[in-house]
Image (spheres, rainbow, N blue to C red):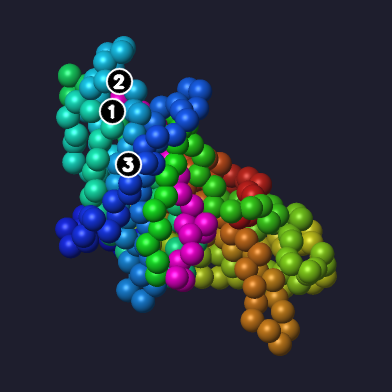
C-alpha cells in the first residue's frame, strides 16, 4: 500500500441496503454486525471501501438502547500502523455511517491483503474501548470484476489474520550486526513444499530486503531438484541501516523451478517489523534486533 484516504466523491446511495437486513436472528454472545462495500479498480489499483452501518452494538448502560458512541477504524493488513477512521456517532447502538475510503494497493499485492474493521466505543472519559473486529481477506474477493460487493460480518472480540493456506515450511536464520549495519539471512531447509500436481519438485528460495514498501535488493538460492524437503544451506547479507529497522522486512519466497515454463510461487513469508509482520514473524524480527550479532533461527509456515 502506498496511500490511503477518505473519499467524498462516491454516491453513498449506491451502497445503501434495505432495512430488511436489520432483522436477523441474534447469535449467542453477539457483539454486533457490520455492513460494508468493497470494490477494486484494477486499472487504477484503487481499493474502494465503504462503511455502511453497524447493528446491535452492546451498550454501556445495561438495558439502555443508546448507551454507545461508536466509530470504525479500517486497516489494510498487515499494515496496522496506518488506518482510516469514520466519524463518531452519538448515543446509538445502530449507527449508520455511509462513508467511503480509498486504499492504493497494487495488483500484485491485492490477494495478500486483508481488510480489518475495528469498532470502538468512546466512553464519557473520552477513552476508546474496543467492541470488536471483522476481517475480509481480499483473496476471497473477485478483484478482476471491478464490481461493487456489499458484505456483512459479525464482530468478534479477537481475530487472527492469515493470508492463505499452508504450503510448506522453511527454516530461516536472521543475524543483525549493528556495528556493520548488515543483516544476514540464512535459508537452511524446507519441508513439505507442495505444488499442484506434483510431490517431487525443483525449488529455490528468493530473499528480498524491503524498506518502506520498496524492494532494495533481491537474491536467490541454487535450485534443489526433485524433492519436497529441500536442503539449501545458503546465506545472504544485505546492507540495512539501524535507522531503517522499524520500516524494513525480509520477504522469503519459495519458488518452483519449471524448465521451459515460468517459475511458480510455492509460498512466502514476511519477517519484519510491526509495520509488516505479526505473530511468529514479528517475534523472530524483534528477537534478532534484541540479540544483535547472534543468529536467531525459526521454522516459518509458508502461505
Of the two numbered discs 2 and 3 on the same chain, state the one appearing first in sequence.
Answer: 3
Residue bearing mark 2: 59
The residue depicted at 50 percent of the width and 27 percent of the height is: 27
Residue stretch in magenta: 128-145
Nearer-N-terminus badge (2/1): 2
Q: Do the residues labelled 2 and 1 touch (CB within 8 Å)?
A: yes
Image quadrant containing the C terminus: bottom right
Residue 288: tell me if it is visible: no
Mark 1 Cα-neighbour bin, 10 Å: few <14, some 14–19, many ≥20:
many
Please name the residue that numbered disc 1 is placed on.
93
**3D distance between C-alphas at marks 2 and 1:** 7 Å
Residue nearest the observer in this picture, 150 or 25: 25
Name the secondary structure under disc 1.
loop
- Describe residue 163's horizontal placement relative to residue 145 as left or right: right
What residue sits 40% from the left and 66% below the top? 147
Residue 232, x across and y down, in percent: 72, 63
Above or below, 92 relative to 222: above
Q: Label 3's element?
A: helix
**Nearest the eye: 183 or 278:** 278
The front one of 211 and 296 is: 211
> Hey, which residue is sitting farthest top in the picture?
62
* Rendered residue at 32%/37% (across/down): 54
**Residue 265, numbered circle:** none
* Tag nearer the camera, 3 or 1: 3
Q: Along the polypeptide, which appears first: circle 3 or circle 1? A: 3
Q: How far apart are marks 2 and 3 (CA)?
A: 21 Å
Q: Residue furthest bottom?
A: 260
Q: Residues within 10 Å of mark 2 (few under 14, many from 20)?
A: many
From this view, report whether residue 232 is shown above or below residue 247: below
Provide the residue designation for mark 3.
19
Which residue is drawn at the image coordinates 64% and 53% (left, top)?
165
Amino acid at each position: 500500500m502506498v496511500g490511503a484516504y477518505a473519499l467524498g466523491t462516491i454516491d453513498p446511495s449506491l451502497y445503501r441496503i434495505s432495512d430488511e437486513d436489520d432483522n436477523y436472528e441474534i447469535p449467542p454472545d453477539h457483539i454486533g454486525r457490520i455492513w460494508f462495500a468493497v470494490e477494486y479498480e484494477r486499472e487504477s489499483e484503487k481499493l474502494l471501501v465503504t462503511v455502511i452501518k453497524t447493528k446491535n452494538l452492546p451498550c454501556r448502560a445495561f438495558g439502555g438502547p443508546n448507551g454507545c458512541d461508536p466509530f470504525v477504524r479500517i486497516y489494510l493488513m498487515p499494515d496496522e500502523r496506518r488506518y482510516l477512521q469514520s466519524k463518531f456517532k452519538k448515543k446509538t447502538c445502530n449507527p449508520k455511517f455511509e462513508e467511503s475510503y480509498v486504499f492504493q494497493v497494487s495488483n500484485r499485492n491485492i490477494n495478500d491483503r486483508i481488510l480489518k474493521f475495528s469498532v470502538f466505543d468512546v466512553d464519557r472519559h473520552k477513552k476508546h474501548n474496543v467492541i470488536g473486529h471483522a476481517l475480509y481477506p481480499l483473496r476471497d474477493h473477485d478483484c478482476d470484476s471491478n464490481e461493487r460487493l456489499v458484505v456483512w460480518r459479525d464482530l468478534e472480540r479477537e481475530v487472527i489474520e492469515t493470508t492463505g493456506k499452508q504450503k510448506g515450511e522453511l527454516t530461516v536464520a536472521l543475524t543483525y550486526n549493528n556495528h556493520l549495519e548488515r543483516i544476514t539471512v540464512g535459508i537452511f531447509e524446507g519441508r513439505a513444499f507442495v505444488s499442484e500436481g506434483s510431490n517431487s519438485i525443483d525449488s529455490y528460495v528468493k530473499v528480498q530486503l524491503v524498506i518502506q514498501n520498496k524492494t532494495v535488493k533481491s537474491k536467490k538460492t541454487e535450485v534443489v531438484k526433485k524433492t519436497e524437503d529441500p536442503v539449501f544451506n545458503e546465506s545472504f547479507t544485505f546492507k540495512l541501516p539501524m535507522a531503517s529497522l522499524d520500516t524494513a522486512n525480509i520477504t522469503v519466497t519459495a519458488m518452483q523451478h519449471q524448465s521451459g515454463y515460468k517459475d511458480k510461487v510455492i509460498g512466502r513469508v514476511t519477517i519484519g517489523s510491526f509495520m509488516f509482520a505479526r505473530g511468529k514473524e514479528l517475534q523472530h524480527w524483534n528477537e534478532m534486533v534484541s540479540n544483535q550479532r547472534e543468529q536467531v533461527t525459526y521454522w516459518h509456515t509458508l502461505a
